[in-house]
Image (cartoon, rainbow, N blue to C red):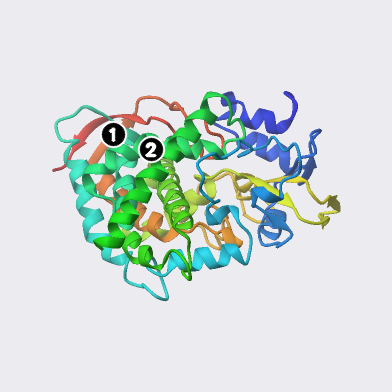
Amino acid sequence: MTSGSISAQILDYASRADPYPLYAELRKTPVLREDDGTYLVSSYHAVRSLANDPRLSQDPRNRPPGYAGPGHSEDDSGLPPSFILTDPPEHDRLRATANRPFGPPHSPRFLDGLRGELAAVVTTLLDAFDGKNEVDIVEDFAYPLPVTAICKVLGVPREDEPRFYGWADAVASGIDPQHGGLAAEEYQRARKELGAYLADLIDTKRRHPGPGILSALAPDTGPGGSMTPGDLVATAILLLVAGHETTVNLITNTTLTLLRHPDVLERFRNEPNLTVPLVEEVLRFEPPVQFVPINVTLADIDIDGVTIPKGSPVWLMIAAANRDPNRFEDPDRFVPDRKDNEHLGFYTGIHYCFGAPLARIEASLALPELFRRVKNFRLLEDPPPYRTNAVLRGPRHLPVAIESFSA
């Protein structure tokens, strides 16, 4: 990409607080070819169509020679790609195996059974607000809750949870189009260290089963199993990072959006049934994942009057599609009870977010309780400082002043 290209402007940190005018400009050419041969797809129907098209691949083994886009760094961890970076039938086998202990139809009560424990975590985190005049919603609330949740899902010992903070940040950087240099080195180091930790944990779970999906999956690895040991480690890394990073952004973006819309906040406090549609509207209005830049075409694809040639990198611009006026009425307005809200906040197709049910549970537990107990608080910085990662966009910190708190 060139320094003046629209993708370069989107990646520019100066745009992080409000990239939506750039997305609006991008939608004027819904399938845009940049000088380096990358195609940016931004209309709702085109993004949805391509995300469900088997001719579009996320497998790094299908990338063209000389590819220098997101995730181009060689992975020297010795692990196979996670299932999000594979195509059918490999993808379907790995994802179905991972889902057996996680959700329907095999384990329909697993996630719901975590509600009590997660509600207790929310209470503990909010109890720590008592007596404070200022807190950071990210560091003190939105960040620790998903780490605890995904560690409970996997079966990670509680005392090891703090080790995952740095690992998760570094591994998540691998999807950033600006990933390279020191960030790439940190990514490699974190994936190796995290992989080694999880391999040891899985071995322990195989010998001494306990709660969590790693114990359920560990015996079925090796010859004749649905996963190799490397597949299970790669899957665990994916679930840890994806199940954590997006939920941090979802909770933080919802908090920020509500503080910017006091009329909606007042409704939210008084209408318990508003929680579900409101979270869905945040997923449309401020999606935790802004775009998916790791696709490549396996064949020529004709869409919206443009032929995207075989071997072309494709960025699917979720946040632009979610505000497409040809799909959503008044798309730049936050409407907490929006009807017909089939957003792409958790993507679509075979790569639909695996952890979406868990993220929704966490948000539905955390947000009503946060705004019930903190009766009156205000932003100390607006816009707040954002994370450098343009893909996983969300505030790095969200400092607020607490003016009234309920025990």
Identify whether 216 is placed above or below 180: below
Quarter of the C terminus within the rendering: top left
Inter-mark Cα distance, 1 to 2: 8 Å
Instruction: Tell me residue 271's x, y (percent).
Output: 32, 57
Frontmost residue, 121 versus 304:
121
Quarter of the N terminus within the rendering: top right
Q: Is residue 49 left or right of residue 231?
A: right
Q: Which mark is residue 295?
A: none
Instruction: Tell me residue 385's x, y (percent).
Output: 44, 26
The amino acid marked with disc number 1 is: Phe
Q: Specify the quadrant of the image occupied by residue 176.
A: top right
Q: Is residue 135 left or right of residue 255?
A: left
Q: Residue at x 57, y 61 (%)?
A: 342
- Disc 1 element: strand
Q: Residue at x 34, y 66 (%)?
A: 216
The amino acid marked with disc number 2 is: Leu
Frontmost residue, 269 versus 369:
369
Residue 206 visible at all: yes
Instruction: Tell me residue 31's x, y (percent).
Output: 78, 46
CB-based contact (under 8 Å), mark 1 and mark 2: yes
Q: Residue at x 60, y 30 (%)?
A: 178
Instruction: Tell me residue 308's x, y (percent).
Output: 82, 50
The residue to which callout 1 is attached is: 377
Frontmost residue, 315 versus 206:
206
Q: Is residue 394 left or right of residue 397?
A: right
The residue to which callout 2 is attached is: 259
Quick one: label 1 or label 2, which is nearer the N terminus? 2
Frontmost residue, 342 versus 201:
201
Q: Residues within 10 Å of mark 2 (few under 14, many from 20)?
A: some
Q: Specify the quadrant of the image occupied by residue 195.
A: top left
